[in-house]
Image (cartoon, grey):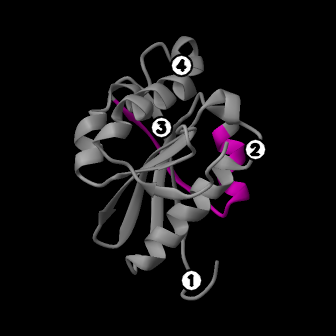
Amino acid sequence: MTDETIRPADARDVPAVRAVTDAAYRPYLAAIGVAPAPMAADHAADVAAGRVFVTGAPVVGLVVVEAFPGHLFLESVAVHPDARGGGVGRRLLTFVEARARALRLPEIRLYTNALMRENQRLYPRYGYEVVERRVDGPYDRVHYRKRLLPGVS
């Protein structure tokens, strides 16, 4: 990766956002039995709404976030399989936390499919705690949150 900055995506990034998201989530198709929700997202609308932030030139990782009263919702983290193990995911999660703090939001929330077992090992290492497990349509989801203390990373 030649560029480690994380920046808001723009309309020119939509094909890369789609490609990275599809590549990142494709391995879960067989296990889940349906396309993971991020694969079906309206990427152009998310980019236009300012919810997508990308890294890399070319794009190798991204997050989709949305601010709500009281929390920042982390809808998706996607790292292209070719870029895994290089710290891209860690940098994106650090960015999400900084974004929540900049927006003065005390909490980050996210969910992951219960069959994405590596995520259930990953998120607690970054300070996320399980809130609940809930079935939403075809998805069995584990919901997490990370409470942010003022002035603490």
Q: What amino acid is found at the position of numbered circle 4 in the picture?
A: Arg
Mark 2 lies on residue: 86
Say whether disc 2 or disc 3 marks the residue closer to the N-terminus: 2
- Is residue 90 placed above or below 45 in the rendered structure? below
Label 3 sits on a secondary structure element that is strand
- Is residue 101 placed above or below 63 in the rendered structure? below
Say whether disc 1 or disc 4 marks the residue closer to the N-terminus: 4
Say whether disc 1 or disc 2 marks the residue closer to the N-terminus: 2
**Span shown in magenta:** 119-136
Quarter of the picture containing the N terminus is top right
The label shown at residue 26 is 4
Q: Nearer the viewer, mark 4 or mark 2?
A: 2
Q: What amino acid is found at the position of numbered circle 1 in the picture?
A: Leu
The label shown at residue 36 is none
Quarter of the picture containing the C terminus is bottom right
Q: Nearer the viewer, mark 1 or mark 4?
A: 4
Residue drawn at x 37%, y 23% as measured from the top left: 138
Verify whether residue 128 appears in magenta.
Answer: yes
Residue 83 in view of the camera:
yes
Question: Label 2: how many residues lie within 10 Å, few (<14), some (14-19) or many (20+)?
Answer: few
Label 2 sits on a secondary structure element that is loop
Residue 6: % across, % down: 52, 57
Q: Nearer the viewer, mark 3 or mark 1?
A: 1
The label shown at residue 141 is 3
